[in-house]
Image (cartoon, rainbow, N blue to C red):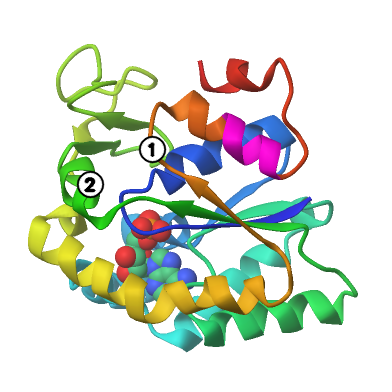
């Protein structure tokens, strides 16, 4: 399956993406994670991306297209992928449509995670990530690591993303409203979008997502337990 996951910051997109990809046995492709890897390796691309990310802005078009083009060309995406954080504006959506059309492929679904803006700041303020693996996500309010500041899964440091500070989150929300929300309309016109409430526990949101793509089932919650 080829699936896009779209949603404002704080909707729990990254968490859902990890569970969905595992459940569907497809690679989780996140532009945020790809940039983060570059930043960690200290590449020139990473340094450039870091400046934009910390300002709550989008990384420039050519840089983003280069990174995602290279990722989608790897063989593990041949039988499907779950895209998280791309496309983030209509120009990127058009590039993705072109890549898929060149391979005579199409998207199966676009999942649009919905959360009231009022909840975003509170949710993001409580988010913590593992320094070693951004897929290890914790919440200080519910789902904190067992030992404060230490990842339950690999023992690395747990930290708050610099771009999760309130002023930056407000900027990211504005970018979402102006640039990313139109991507939902772009795919709505193609009949691909299902909007899902991101409210509630992780396994409940996962059930909604799996139902929306016709993959709901008794074992669906196991993935998120
Ligand atoms: P995320 O982990 O998806 O929240 O992404 C973190 C940051 O990386 C975003 O706030 C953007 O600054 C940048 N970023 C991620 N994906 C994209 C994209 N498709 N286009 C431009 N910038 C992106």
| Residue 155 percent across, percent down from the top left | 30, 20
Per the rendering, the mark at residue 119 is: 2
Q: Against 149, is 115 above or below? A: below
Per the rendering, the mark at residue 199 is: 1
**Is 161 positioned to the left or the right of 96 in the image?**
left
Dividing the image into four equal quarters, which quarter contains ligand 1? bottom left
Toward the viewer: 3 or 196?
Answer: 196
| Residue 218 percent across, percent down from the top left | 72, 15
**Is 157 positioned to the left or the right of 207 in the image?**
left
Mark 1: secondary structure: loop
Residue bounds of the magenta highlight: 207-212
Q: Which residue is drawn at 69% across and 36% down?
A: 211
Assess whether residue 223 is covered by the magenta stretch.
Answer: no
Q: Against 41, is 125 above or below? A: above
| Residue 84 percent across, percent down from the top left | 53, 56
What secondary structure do most residues of the magenta stretch adopt?
helix
Q: Residue at x 17, y 51 (%)?
A: 121
Give the Cα separation between the discs numbered 2 and 1: 9 Å
Q: Against 36, is 221 above or below? A: above
Badge 2 vs badge 1, beta-carbon distance below 8 Å: yes
**Is 160 positioned to the left or the right of 96 in the image?**
left
**For the residue carrying disc 1, how many other residues have a C-alpha within 10 Å: few (<14), some (14-19), or many (20+)?**
some
Residue reaching furthest right?
Answer: 104
Q: Residue at x 73, y 60 (%)?
A: 74
Figure quadrant of residue 50: bottom left
Query: What number of labels is visible?
Result: 2
Mark 2: secondary structure: helix
| Residue 119 percent across, percent down from the top left | 22, 47
Q: Against 140, is 12 above or below? A: below
């Amino acid at each position: 399956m080829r699936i896009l996951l779209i949603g404002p910051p704080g909707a729990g997109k990254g968490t859902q993406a990890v569970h969905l990809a595992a459940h569907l046995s497809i690679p989780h492709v996140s532009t945020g994670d790809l940039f983060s890897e570059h930043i960690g390796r200290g590449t020139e691309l990473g340094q450039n991306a870091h400046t934009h990310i910390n300002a709550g802005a989008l990384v420039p078009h050519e840089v983003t297209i280069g990174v995602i083009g290279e990722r989608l060309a790897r063989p593990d995406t041949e039988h499907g992928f779950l895209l998280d954080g791309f496309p983030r504006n209509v120009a990127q959506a058009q590039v993705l449509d072109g890549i898929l059309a060149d391979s005579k492929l199409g998207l199966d679904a676009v999942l649009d995670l919905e959360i009231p803006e009022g909840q975003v700041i509170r949710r993001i303020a409580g988010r913590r990530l593992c320094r070693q693996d951004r897929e290890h996500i914790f919440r200080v309010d519910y789902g904190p690591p067992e030992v404060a500041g230490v990842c339950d899964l690999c023992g690395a440091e747990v930290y708050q993303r610099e771009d999760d500070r309130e002023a930056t989150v407000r900027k990211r929300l504005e970018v979402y409203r102006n640039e990313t929300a139109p991507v939902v309309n772009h795919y709505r016109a193609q009949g691909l979008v299902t909007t899902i409430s991101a409210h509630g526990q992780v396994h409940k949101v996962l059930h909604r997502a799996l139902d929306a793509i016709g993959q709901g089932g008794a074992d669906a919650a196991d993935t998120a337990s």
